[in-house]
Image: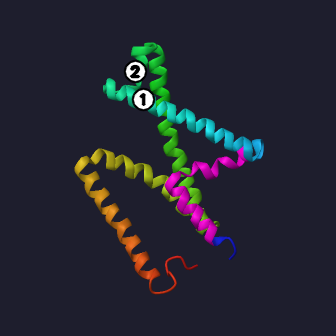
Amino acid sequence: MPGTKIKKQFIVISSVIGTGIFSGNGDALAASGPVGLLLDVLVLGCIAICVGETVSEFVQLWGVPNAVYEYVAAFVDEDVAWVVAILYWYSFASAAAVQMLSAAKLMLYWQPENWLPPMIFFGLVPWFLFILNMAGVQVGRALSLLLLGWVYGGCLTEIARSTRGPRLSWGY
């Protein structure tokens, strides 16, 4: 099937740098063209670097808990700090939903006619994450080590299979 290899490469790249760059840039590319999209990415990248540098300087000079609220309350205004803190929480809450939506769309790549696995994914993952957060650090550490071993084991299995001929796990 032509283009299958490049699709797999983009799936791997999107899991490393984030899915938003591939699922959200199509509309921006259609509206502004390639030069406009490049300028947009450069400008927003510079803004992200400046914000990261500023926050890192604050953290080094004045490390406090609930830093987003405290920095804005100390240097701007307490009412603005409440708004910034709520928007900060909302940005992370919406990012989790967007990542789950992107993962569900990625699941549809392999079986586009089957809508049940993404629905199960949407139903079970939030409950799993809630239970994991309530379980404590020891359970989270054990689960992360198990997941890490599973990923490394899968990588080693793929490397071993690739030295013996065609890889069986990517066969359709």
Q: How many marks?
A: 2
- The residue located at (31%, 26%) in the rendering is 63
Task: Report the Cα–Cα distance between label 2 and label 1.
Answer: 9 Å
- Quarter of the image for residue 7 reads bottom right
Would you say residue 15 is visible in this rendering? yes
- Of the residues shown, which amino acid type is indicated by label 2? Tyr
x, y (%) of residue 116?
55, 62
Label 1's element? helix
Residue under the point 57% across and 39% down? 45
Residue underneath mark 2: 71
CB under 8 Å between callouts 2 and 1?
A: yes
Closer to us: 90 or 67: 67
Q: Nearer the viewer, residue 87 or 124?
A: 87
- Can residue 89 be seen from the camera position used here? no
- Magenta highlight on residue 113: no
Q: Say which amino acid is labelled 1.
A: Val
Q: Is residue 20 magenta?
A: yes
Hey, which quadrant is residue 142 in on the image?
bottom left
**Please, is residue 100 above or below residue 78 in the view?**
below
Residue 107: image location, x then y, percent: 56, 62
Residue under label 1: 55
Q: Which residues are magenta?
A: 5-29
> Element type at marker 2?
helix
